[in-house]
Amino acid sequence: MHPDTFHRLHHARSADLRREAGTHRRAAEAQHPGLPGHRDVRTQLGWALVELGLRLVRTADDARLRTARVS
């Protein structure tokens, strides 16, 4: 596929996806009008889980390195 054609198709599809996401977001907000801050809580929870995962990975890597040094 020619790069220009791909580029135009990509932009058209991206615009469609952004429109669909906006429609979905507005519908979700209309369903839960009493929860204005629920996005903030979900975001904070998500980042807390990411941080926990990174700590677990780092701890596992540290343990693996300590065992590799001992043997």
Image (spheres, rainbow, N blue to C red):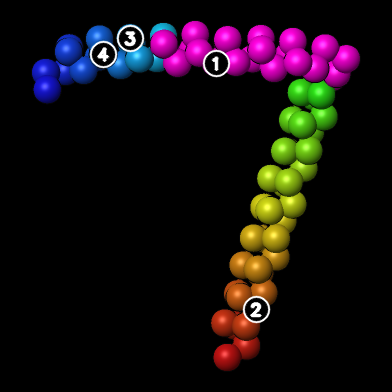
The number of discs equals: 4
Marks 1 and 4, the one that precedes in the sequence: 4
Task: Judge by depth and name the residue closer to the eye, 64 or 33.
Answer: 33
**Numbered badge on residue 12:** 3
Q: Is residue 69 above or below residue 58?
A: below
Judged from the image, the secondary structure of the residue bearing numbered disc 4 is helix
Tag in front: 1 or 2: 1
User: Could you say which quadrant of the image residue 6 lies in?
Assistant: top left
Crowdedness of circle 1 by 10 Å Cα count: few (<14), some, many (20+)? few
Reply above or below: 60 against 67. Answer: above
Q: Which residue in the structure is indicated by mark 1?
A: 21
Q: Which residues are magenta?
A: 16-37
- 43 horizontally vs 71: left or right: right
The residue tagged 2 is: 66
Give the spatial CA distance, label 1 vs label 4: 18 Å
Is residue 36 visible in the rendered image? The answer is no
